[in-house]
């Protein structure tokens, strides 16, 4: 069963909120992600979000700063809103690239 480009694009749209939440340190349960991704893509999605979340927000002395534009300091909620309002397109592009890479690697070696 292959994963087509449209499904990956739709999935990346649905993962935006989760990426922003994980990036700022808010909790996201595996069950929530499984509802969105399905069981077959859960592990790949978790790995993708873990890698990308480290790139979006940096923390200095307990304050959150956007790693994409340098703005801040933010509270967790402020950083989440900033990412969702200002960097939605960038996050979607990052998710798409990372998911395509991880999915192609996983299907090439099976």
Image (tube, helix red, strand yellow):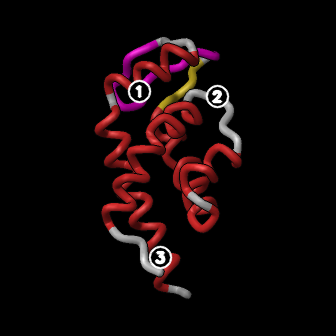
Please provide percent x and percent y for residue 19: 51, 39
Disc 1 element: helix
CA gap, disc 1 to disc 2?
13 Å
Give the residues in magenta: 62-72
Write down the residue under mark 1: 83
Q: Which mark is residue 26?
A: 2
> In the image, what residue occupies the spot 38% across and 17% down?
71
Please provide percent x and percent y for residue 3: 42, 72
* Label 1: how many Cα within 10 Å (few below 14, some 14–19, many 20+): many
- Please say if 23 is above or below 64: below
* Label 3: how many Cα within 10 Å (few below 14, some 14–19, many 20+): few
Write down the residue under mark 3: 105
Q: Nearer the viewer, residue 6 or 98?
A: 6
> In the image, what residue occupies the spot 56% across and 63% down?
41
* Label 2: how many Cα within 10 Å (few below 14, some 14–19, many 20+): few
Q: Main secondary structure of the magenta part?
A: loop
Along the polypeptide, which appears first: circle 1 or circle 2? 2
> In the image, what residue occupies the spot 49% across and 14% down?
78
Disc 3 element: helix
On the picture, is 57 further left or further right than 94? Answer: right
CA gap, disc 2 to disc 3?
29 Å
Along the polypeptide, which appears first: circle 2 or circle 3? 2
The single residue placed furthest to the bottom in the displayed view is 110
Per the image, is 94 magenta?
no
Using the rendered view, name the quadrant where residue 110 is placed.
bottom right
Q: Nearer the viewer, residue 103 or 31?
A: 31
């Amino acid at each position: 069963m292959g994963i087509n480009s449209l499904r990956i694009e739709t999935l990346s749209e649905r993962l935006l909120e989760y990426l922003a939440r994980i990036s700022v340190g808010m909790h996201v349960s595996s069950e929530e992600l499984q509802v969105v991704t399905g069981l077959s893509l859960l592990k790949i999605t978790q790995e993708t979000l873990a890698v990308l979340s480290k790139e979006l927000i940096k923390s200095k002395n307990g304050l959150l700063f956007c790693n994409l534009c340098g703005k801040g300091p933010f509270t967790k909620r402020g950083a989440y809103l900033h990412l969702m309002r200002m960097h939605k397109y960038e996050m979607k592009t990052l998710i798409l690239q990372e998911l395509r890479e991880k999915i192609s690697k996983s299907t090439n070696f099976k």
